[in-house]
Amino acid sequence: MSDLISQPHSGQIDIKHVHIHLGQGDKRFEALQDVSFTIQPGEFVCILGPSGCGKSTLLGALAGHLQHSLGEITVDGKAVNTPHPDRGLVFQQHTLFPWKTVLDNVAFGLKMKGIGKSERRAEARKLLQLVGLSGFEDSYPAQLSGGMQQRVEIARVLINHPRVLLMDEPFGALDAQTRLMMQELLLEVWARIKTTVVFITHDIDEALFLADRILVMSPRPGRIIEEIKLDFARPRHTDLVTTAHFMQLKRHCIDLLRHQHDHGQPAELPRLSPINGAASHNARYAV
C-alpha cells in the first residue's frame, strides 16, 4: 500500500468569477453567480448550503460535466472543460456495477487503462484494505450494506490516484450511526493519501467535523457568502461535536443559513440519481 500512500498529489483548485446558467429559453436561470475561491493542494473543503443553492452545480462544473457560462475553473493551472480521472467523483447513490464483484468494481478503472489483470487486482486489494473491506473481494454490491457500498465506491475512485476527490453528499442516504462511521473512515483515508477533497453537504455537523474550511453558499443564484476556517486539531474524534467551540460555530452556521433563507428563495429541485439514464446533466446538477 505504500505506493498508493506516497503517490504525489498537487490538486490546487482555482475558481475565478464563475457564472453558470441552466435550462433553455423561458426556463433558463442563473444557478451560480460570480463564484470565486482557491483550494490548496491536500485541503479538505466542505461546501455548505441549502437545497437548490447550486452546490451540486458547482461540483458538476469542477468535474467537467457542466460548462460554465463565464469565468475560469482550473486544477493545477489547467482549464477544466471535460471529465478526467484526475478528478474523482463520488455521488450519494453508488454507481457500482451490480454484476461485478467488489474486487472487479474497484479494479475497473485500471482495466480501462489497459493494466493487466493481476496488477489491477493487486492494487484493488490494497484499496479495499485501506477502506476496511478486506475479505469482501468476492462479494457483489447487493450483498453489502449502504455504508459498505460507499466504501467500495470510494476505493474505486481512489484507484485512479485522483488529484481531487469530489464528493456530492456521499453519506446523505445513510443512517446516523453509519454516517458518522463513514465520516471517521473518510478522515482516516484522507490523512493517509492527502488528496484534495471538495465535499458537498447541507449538514452543518458534517461540515464542521470534516473540513479544514467551509464555504457557505447563498440560495439561488448561488454565491459564496462566507468562508469559515476551522482550527480543530486532527485527528478528529466524535467527542468534538459536543465541545463549546463546535456548538458555537454550529449556531453561527444556523443563523447564517436562516438569515439567507429569510431573505432569499431557495429552489427545491429534485435530486436525480447519476445512474438514471433519463436524467439530463442540467437536471442532475441543478441542486
Image: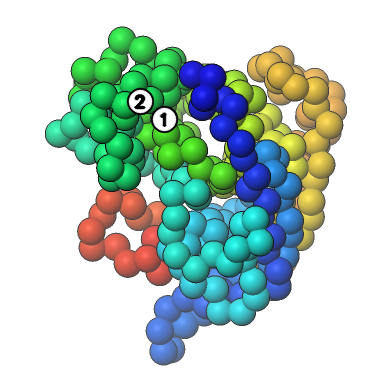
State the separation of the CA atoms marked 1 and 2.
8 Å
Which residue is found at the position 34% from the left and 21% from the top? 122
Q: Quadrant of residue 137?
A: top left
Task: State the image coordinates of residue 108 (x, y, percent, origin top left).
Answer: 28, 37
- Image coords of residue 18 (percent x, y): 64, 72
Q: Quick one: SS at disc 2?
A: helix
Horizontal side of 93 relative to 139 (left or right) equals right
Is residue 200 placed above or below 226 in the rendered structure?
Answer: above
Judge depth for marks 1 and 2 and give the one in front. Answer: 2
Residue 9's image quarter? top right
Q: Is residue 201 visible?
A: no
Circle nearer the N terminus (1, 2): 2
| Residue sitting nearer the eye, 181 or 49 | 181
Mark 2: which amino acid?
A: Ala
Residue 245 visible, this angle: yes
Question: Which residue has dot 2 on it?
Answer: 124
Residue 132 x %, y %: 43, 15
Query: Which residue is painted at 21% across and 18% down in the image?
Result: 138
Q: Is residue 260 depicted above or below 238 in this figure?
A: below
Residue 157 location in percent, x, y?
42, 38
Residue carrying label 1: 155
Q: Mark 1–mark 2 contact, CB under 8 Å? A: yes
Q: Residues within 10 Å of mark 2 (few under 14, many from 20)?
A: many
Horizontal side of residue 22 vs 250, given as left or right: left
Element on which disc 1 rests: helix
